[in-house]
Amino acid sequence: MESERFAAAEEWEDFVSRSFYALAMESAVDRFTAVARLAALSRGVRLSEVATSAPTSLRRTASLVRSNPSEDLLFLIQLAGRSRLEQAGTQLVLGAGEATFCDPSVPYTIETSGHQVVAMVPRREVLPARATSAAVRLRPLSLDLAPLRVFRLLAEEMISTPGGERDLETGSVAGAATELLRSAARAAVGDDAGARSLSREHQLSSVKDYLVTRLMDPGLRLEQVAADNAMSLRQLTAVFAPEDSPAAYIRRERLRRAHRDLTDPGFAAVPVAAVAARWGFADASTFGRAFRREYGCSPQAARAEAGSSR
């Protein structure tokens, strides 16, 4: 997705207010620059990646809350640099690898610099039962929490994916994103055990979303998949069992995407071996055998058939 670049604080203030909700710029240095990328999913979920060259201060004033109400929660992951937030008498400083919720229905100030991933999500989608936004706002969270690590990977993948490709999976991704943020909200209100003990269905969804961002890596290992999702290898296998296995899922999804590329006229000039390598198959012969087992024909035949049908 194309990045939008800003060299003036006024332009940045206007962009932030249009993309999220109305905010007022309090201060910025003279040589201010910012870069942002956005992705809108279904179910009201919006994702963005933001980098600023120098500290800026934005305020959500009481008048802006009244004139420009929002039913969303903002979720901020600090990747580099730091942010200081103040809301309803609480202050929080976020360093790299930390995250928090903020409530735009309550006035707040944020002084931020560096690199962040930001999500806007309807509060009804993420707040735990009987919890109010006061229970989650400005509660520090760490990316050591498995659902947040997966959410970060998912958000970065969707933000960097071209709109046409992203639209194919936006519904399932939005569902996974809200479930992961719901787990973060449970952690924020003190239900850490519940956040770590996702149901099998939610664990499976989280692992699959993680794997989608790694399919192009020919060195992907199940041991690393398990470790990155705070599981043992046995637990990872159990999440997929008995209907499937992690290795079979990876192979099937790689083949599905390779088949999509081979039947796409935009990839007609790309050699079959290059398509195989793009989706993590280091050996073209292995790819050819796996493709034939899955689709009943060779990769070359699938490409030729797609070409003749157009």
Image (tube, rainbow, N blue to C red):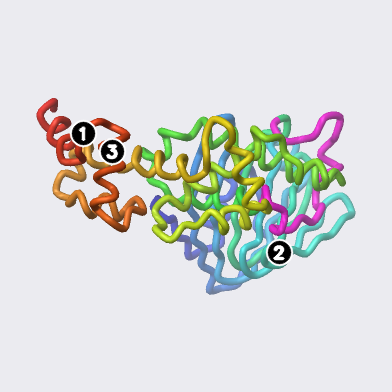
Q: Give the magenta part as a residue range.
A: 125-148
Residue 44 position within the rendered picture, expressed as x and y whole percent measured from the top left: 59, 32
Within 10 angstroms of label 3, few (less than 14), some, or many (20 or more) residues?
Answer: some
| Label 1 Cα crowd, 10 Å radius (few <14 / some 14-19 / many 20+) | some
Is residue 243 shown above or below 195? Answer: above
Circle 2: is it few (<14), some (14-19), or many (20+) Cα within 10 Å?
A: many
Determine the residue positioned at 14% across, 30% down.
305
Q: Nearer the viewer, residue 89 or 160?
A: 160
| Residue 18 appearing in the image | no
Residue at image mark 2? 83
State which tag comes first along the sequence, 3 or 2. Answer: 2
Residue to which mark 3 is pinned: 259
Q: Which residue is drawn at the image coordinates 85% and 34% (left, top)?
A: 131
Residue 4 spot, x, y in % from top left: 44, 55
**Residue 207 visible to the viewer:** yes
| Residue bearing mark 1 | 297
In this rendered view, identify the residue nearer to me: 106 or 185.
185
Find numbered disc 1 in the image and state the secondary structure of the residue it sits on.
loop
Q: Is residue 146 magenta?
A: yes
Q: Is residue 200 left or right of residue 91?
A: left
Q: Quadrant of residue 77?
A: bottom right
Instruction: Determine whether, in the image, residue 179 is placed left or right of residue 218.
Output: right
Position of the C terminus, as image quadrant, is: top left
Q: Nearer the viewer, mark 1 or mark 2?
A: 1
**Mark 1–mark 3 contact, CB under 8 Å?**
no
Residue 261 falls left or right of residue 241:
left
Q: Which mark is residue 220?
A: none
- Amino acid, disc 2: Ser
Q: Earlier in the sequence, mark 1 or mark 3?
A: 3
**SS at mark 3 in the image:** helix
